[in-house]
Amino acid sequence: MKHFDVVVVGSGPGGFTSALILARQGFKTALVEREKLGGTCLQRGCIPKEGMYQIARSAHFLKKRLGVSVPLDFEKALLKVRERINKIEENAKFLLKKEGIVLVEGSAKLVDEKVIKVGRNTYLKADHIILACGSRQKEAGVSAEDLLTGKVKPKGKILIEGSGATACELSFILSVFGFEVFLKVEGRLLKDYPVEEEFVEKLERELEMCGVKFTTTNEDADLLVKATGRVPNLCEEEFPFLERDEEGYVKVSPYMRTNLQNVYAVGDITKPMGASHAIAKAKSACQCIMGCPQPYRPELVPVVICSALELGFVGSMKEGRRIVKTLNANTKSFVNGWNGMISIIVDEEERLSYSSMLGECVSEPMNIASAIIGSALWDQFFFSNNYTHPSICESFSDLSLEFMFNLLNL
Ligand SMILES: Cc1cc2nc3c(=O)[nH]c(=O)nc-3n(C[C@H](O)[C@H](O)[C@H](O)COP(=O)(O)OP(=O)(O)OC[C@H]3O[C@@H](n4cnc5c(N)ncnc54)[C@H](O)[C@@H]3O)c2cc1C
């Protein structure tokens, strides 16, 4: 039986990040993957979505600002995007080799807390095991993943069912690419996300302006796409002994340790889902294995939803003083007609507990906000930091200045 310091199962952002960090720290590492390298994120999710989104966004901007329509072809665009994905996969393989990580192809099973079985008769013994098996669509039917891999081609009138990030993102992309899009939402759009109602309403209006039609009924359509949620990808028979919650997520400590001492679980098999969370969880599990434990703190993980507008947020929406402003005073946002908004929540001890932005190019500023969540020095940090000009980040400086000098109408 081959022995490793660490065996990681799953090569999505959770597994790949873990393997890379630990190998670079000198751990003898194996990475087990049963499909293509990169997981949902690279192959079927975040990255193809980002590629298609940027094309849609550029075309949408020209239409909105200048009335110029760019003829778009979904299949051609996807081909371009997938070329880049293949290249990323190739580079990732090269990186694994360079770092001495052994890639084991096949389906893994947990035999006991120190042994993983791959395929029929490969057994890997490990001092530590990290499970990062990801998630899969909850309901049967065509998924966003099917469209982003080219397995299913979009056509004519498309009905998308769902109220989460994927429903928001896909409806925008398909609508800009010229399809007639109906979005069937039960309850409120983004109801399970920590986002403010007025931001969601503004996003809905913007989606409608892009041609997305909201509905609560089952429209007749050429294609029905399910975006109704995902479930952890870990079947009981292959991964026994692990404690799970009632929804099937693996129960973990703040250091991502499962009920088995040497087994960690990261990524979508633990709550909450999302690639930025998967990476944060992976870092935490690795730090624990490396002997310098740092808990995973979900409230410090920024998230962005890329739709008719981008909606970024970080922190927790606790009680506190809420400050909301338009980004009209921000020259980058205003000159481009981006119609942005920013909000923060400051708790009773003056700590920054939440920040969100709606507009364009808001995903990068959220990374700055995440660095100062939970601190009472947030206003000085935002003010004394320097920013490129023009940039959306400058709005943090403006907001903190107004806060420090009590210029805000609270
Ligand atoms: C359309 C779409 C768009 C998305 N966009 C974003 C976004 O913009 N930003 C964001 O933060 N998140 C986004 N997500 C979510 C993101 O993709 C996931 O949260 C992330 O990929 C989870 O990472 P992971 O490491 O847990 O697992 P995954 O990326 O799902 O990878 C798991 C891997 O494990 C392998 N595996 C599973 N079981 C076994 C086994 N028994 N043996 C061997 N291998 C196994 C699978 O084959 C897979 O490759 C999106 C998701 C979708 C579907």
Image: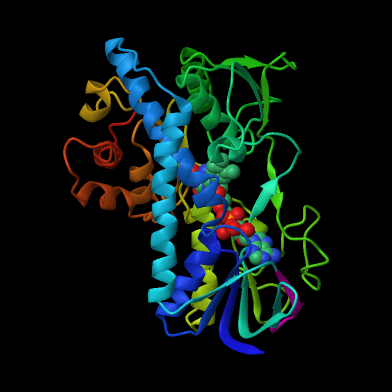
Q: Which residues are magenta?
A: 108-114
- The image shows residue 174 at horizontal and vertical percentages of 51, 24
The correct choice, above or below, for 188 with respect to 252 in the image is above
Across and down, in percent, residue 227 comes to 65, 34
Q: Is residue 223 above or below residue 119?
A: above
Residue 340 in which image quadrant: top left
Relative vertical location of residue 57 with respect to residue 5 in this rendering, above or below: above
Q: Residue at x 52, y 49 (%)?
A: 43
The answer to which of 370 and 363 lies nearer the viewer is 363
Looking at the rendered image, the quarter that the C terminus falls into is: top left
* Percent x, y of residue 203: 49, 24
Q: How is the image coloured?
A: rainbow
Look at the image and tell me whether residue 355 can be seen.
no
Q: Quadrant of the N terminus?
A: bottom right
In the orientation shown, which residue stands out farthest toward the right? 237
Q: Is residue 314 magenta?
A: no
Residue 108 visible in the picture: yes
259, 275: nearer the viewer? 275
Horizontal side of 137 relative to 394 (left or right) equals: right
Measured as percent of width and height from the top left, residue 121 is found at: 73, 79
| Secondary structure mostly taken by the magenta-highlighted segment of the chain | strand
